[in-house]
Image (cartoon, rainbow, N blue to C red):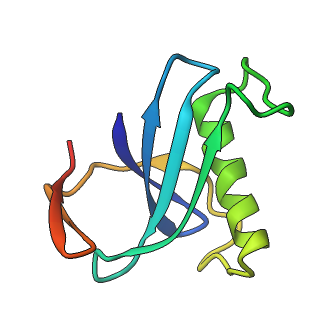
Amino acid sequence: MVREFFYGGDRYRATVHGRPGKEEIFIVQVLEDDEEGPEISLDRFEDVANDPNASLEVVLAGMVDRMHKEQSLTASQSGVPFNWSEAKGLTRVHNGVQEIH
């Protein structure tokens, strides 16, 4: 699954592989110009702190919080809750274009 979401006022793209509770997750912040920004990943299958019953939304929000802390980033509007978004048709990825469904 590739899907965009908003959290803390910022836009992110999540790529999720695997079965529920044991996914491998990649998150990249999508900047204003649709370029990729900071990123973080997690393999829930190998993470000893993983709660396989936690919802994907809770895990994604926690990953973004961890990314912000580890990379000394600031959310544009802290306190804004998690919200799935309707994805744009195309997003620039490095030097190419990726279709978002």
Q: Is 60 situated above or below 54? A: below
x and y percent of residue 27 in the render? 51, 54
Q: Nearer the viewer, residue 54 or 17?
A: 17
- Total residue callouts: 0
Left or right: residue 100 compared with residue 72: left
Left or right: residue 56 compared with residue 14: right
Q: Nearer the viewer, residue 61 or 47?
A: 47
Left or right: residue 32 compared with residue 50: left
Image quarter of the C terminus = top left
Image quarter of the N terminus = top left
x and y percent of residue 23 in the render? 56, 28
x and y percent of residue 65 in the render? 72, 60
Which of the 4 quarters of the picture holds residue 9?
bottom right
Which residue appears farthest toward the front when viewing the image?
A: 46
Residue depicted at 79% across the width and 25% down the height:
51
Which of the 4 quarters of the picture holds residue 52?
top right
Residue depicted at 64% across the width and 20% down the height:
21
Q: Is 13 situated above or below 24? A: below
Residue depicted at 69% across the width and 71% down the height:
78
x and y percent of residue 11 in the render? 44, 65
Residue depicted at 45% across the width and 48% down the height:
14
Left or right: residue 46 compared with residue 30: right
